[in-house]
Image (cartoon, rainbow, N blue to C red):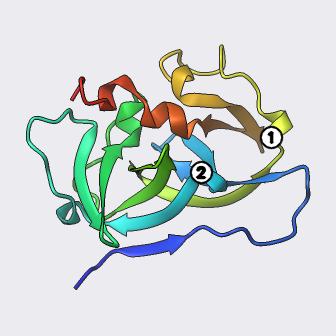
Amino acid sequence: MNSSLSFELTNTGAADQTTQSFLKLRLSDTTIAVIPTVEAQEVVMVTHQQLTLMPNMPGTILGLLNHRNRVIWVIDLPQLLGLPMLMLDLRQYAVVVIQVAGQLLGLAIQQIEGLSRLNPSDIQSPVGSVDASLVPFLRGCYLQDQELLLVLDAAAIAHAKSLQPHAI
């Protein structure tokens, strides 16, 4: 029996034309990020046992997930970004499945915080607001209710040097 839970992200219809829907992700106790829902295909809840570990891989790569007859590499997104790695004793991970240049990639995170509607024109440069090591993976930052949200760049994450075949 497959114990994973998944849901697909769909556009809920008419909304304010100046805002865009973002999936809100908890990367650590103090770090929240968002990714446009148009870049996230679905969210899958998986246990560590559902991932097939691959030998000689960097710690960033948690393993392979067989989901809907597709094999998806799953990475520890917080660790890739230089944040504390996911705890392996979590009962389950939220895995955001993205597709970049036809390739699927699963971004394992602590939990999904929900959906937010943000105005893309209010996204500001991350330079000077966050640690410099995060900047290559971000489109920017967004201040919402006194909380700094990191706006992730899915393509930059998928093309991270540590995930490329020559680096693995």
Percent coordinates x, y for residue 142 in the rendering: 73, 36
Image vertical order of residue 124 relative to residue 151, above or below? above
**Label 1 near label 2: C-beta < 8 Å?**
no
Quadrant of the drawing holding the C terminus: top left
The residue that label 2 is drawn on is 39
Name the amino acid type tagged 2.
Glu
Q: Nearer the viewer, mark 2 or mark 1?
A: 2
Name the amino acid type tagged 1.
Pro
Quadrant of the drawing holding the N terminus: bottom left
Extreme residue in the front direction: 102
Percent coordinates x, y for residue 139 in the rendering: 65, 30
Extreme residue in the right direction: 17
Local crowd size for mark 2, using a 10 Å CA cut-off: few (<14), some (14–19), many (≥20): some
Percent coordinates x, y for residue 166 in the rendering: 24, 24
- Relative placement, left or right, of 137 versus 6 is right
> Residue 120 got which mark?
1
Residue displayed at 72% across by 22% down: 125
Quick one: label 2 or label 1, which is nearer the N terminus?
2
Q: Is disc 2 placed on a helix, strand or loop?
A: helix
The residue lying toward the viewer, choosing from 52 and 114, is 52
- Relative placement, left or right, of 50 versus 82 is left
Percent coordinates x, y for residue 106 in the rendering: 39, 52
Q: Is disc 1 placed on a helix, strand or loop?
A: helix
